[in-house]
Amino acid sequence: MPLSLLSVTPEVYPLVKTGGLADVAGALPAALAAEDVAVTTFVPGYPAVLGAIGDAAVVHAYDALMGGPATLRRATVAGLDLLVLDAPHLFARDGNPYLGPDGRDWPDNPLRFGAFARAAADVASGLLPDLLPDVVQLHDWQAALTAVYLHYDPPTRRPGVVMTIHNLAFQGIFPAYLLGALGLPAEAFALDALEYYGSIGFLKGGLIFADRITTVSPTYATEITTPEGGMGLGGLLAGRGQVLSGILNGIDTDVWDPAADPRIAARYSAADLGGRAADKSTLQRAFALPEAPEAFVIGSVGRMTEQKGMDLLLALLPELGEVQIVLLGSGDAGMEAAFVAAAAASPDRVACRIGYDEALSHQIQAGSDAFLMPSRFEPCGLTQMYALRYGAVPIVARVGGLADTVIDASPYALAQGVATGFQFAPGSVPAMRAAIRRAAELYRDDEAAWAQLQQNGMATDCSWNSAAKQYAALFRSIRA
Ligand code: ADP
Ligand code: GLC
């Protein structure tokens, strides 16, 4: 019998995405199918999701769910078996899933994701006779209260519960007076439950009441048990160390395949990197940089935030005289403005596009010589794996999943022929400067060694196969 998994997630590619969580939730079901795990993906009915499911069948109706009527609907879209919470009073809003047009969190986020978790707990408990999950996987704080509802309303049939942390920086912390509105008992306001420095923490509740906790890389699984990496939950996570593990994310190797990518100018493979030259000059042209084949082009794609360490790159830009920098991203308004200003001041070596652009992100991977990720912390990171696959040699901070996916080009690793990129101490401008210098010198002085780095990276297995096996084994160990 296949194991039935209910994946409870606030985003899923290709329907709704703000970051890597959507990629993971979108790719895992197909990988798990190969391990005999049948996944139903439970998502909120944002307009983009409702548009995609059309007139999908209603399988349950709530008269009132946190302030309004709601239904559960099922559909299959883009190969995903979806269960959708259609609650117009909570989710029929345009734009970002979490933020209003003013860029601030929707004020009713606790009720929106409380309702989502309440419905997930109902389904987990057997609400739908055709969908009896053996295990529920809760992705991040938005899904975490599911474990709490299952604890305070113990069902006769309780599935195994896995809490998966994609980013500990987002914990869902809200005022304690909301407990009643969320339908939770006063006793939940306790140190060994939801209470968090006088407020309530959704993620904290999930971490306490889940059977297993996973996060998205082995190194991050260790970092989050420390006072520095634990973001206020380090002690709790260290205490639950027996049930905590790190399973490294994969990437979608069909969407990200330089030998078959329709979005890039010229296709290429590890055996024949020739096409990269055309991708590089196309990229330089697209960003109005001098079309110099010998220039060392460093690309970067991602959220412009403190987490991603883009301010460290800003500090270093004036010193990076000989390299060309190509940036795509959005986020912190001050950082965006600073990069735009830097590009205007040095148009022959710094180029930047503010915004979100899937096609351009592929072109940057295909046309850059190296790919920079100076993150202060990084639970896993997907873009450095795209870079490996595209032969854009990653230069990364030695944290979290970056430490687990890139092999530093130390003299020893180079001699052994196993290096795939460059690592440096996180949060340090001098360390980043040294790593970029090491990379630029190797690129300039040793063509064969550089090609070897590219080929090693392209040969790295970044697929979901290994992660799917590990998840399947974990789910089987706790199935209902
Ligand atoms: P995080 O989830 O912390 O943002 P990840 O590396 O796990 O970081 O995932 C980020 C995902 O979002 C990747 O698929 C990346 O390609 C994509 N992405 C981020 N910013 C942009 C952008 N400006 N344009 C296109 N894709 C982007
Ligand atoms: C989070 C993390 C990122 C990770 C992604 C998917 O957004 O910031 O490092 O790759 O989740 O797990």
Image (cartoon, rainbow, N blue to C red):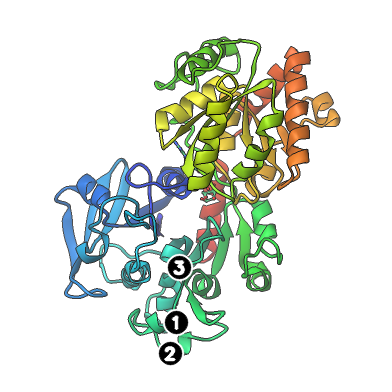
Relative to 337, is 134 above or below? below
Residue 97 in view here = yes
User: Is 91 or 260 nearer to us in this picture?
Assistant: 91
Q: Which mark is residue 144?
A: 3
Q: Is residue 207 above or below residue 186?
A: above
Q: Amino acid at mark 1?
A: Ala
Residue at 42%, 64% (x, y): give it: 143
Quickly name the residue at label 1.
176
Residue type (three-letter) at the residue carrying disc 3:
Ala
Residue 189's spot in the image, x, y percent? 49, 86
Looking at the image, is 373 positioned above or below residue 163?
A: above
Assign the C terminus to one quadrant of the image.
bottom left
Q: Are marks 2 and 3 in contact (CB under 8 Å)?
A: no
Residue drawn at point x = 47 percent, y = 36 percent: 252
Nearer-N-terminus badge (2/3):
3
The number of callouts visible is 3
How far is mark 2 from mark 1, CA to CA?
9 Å
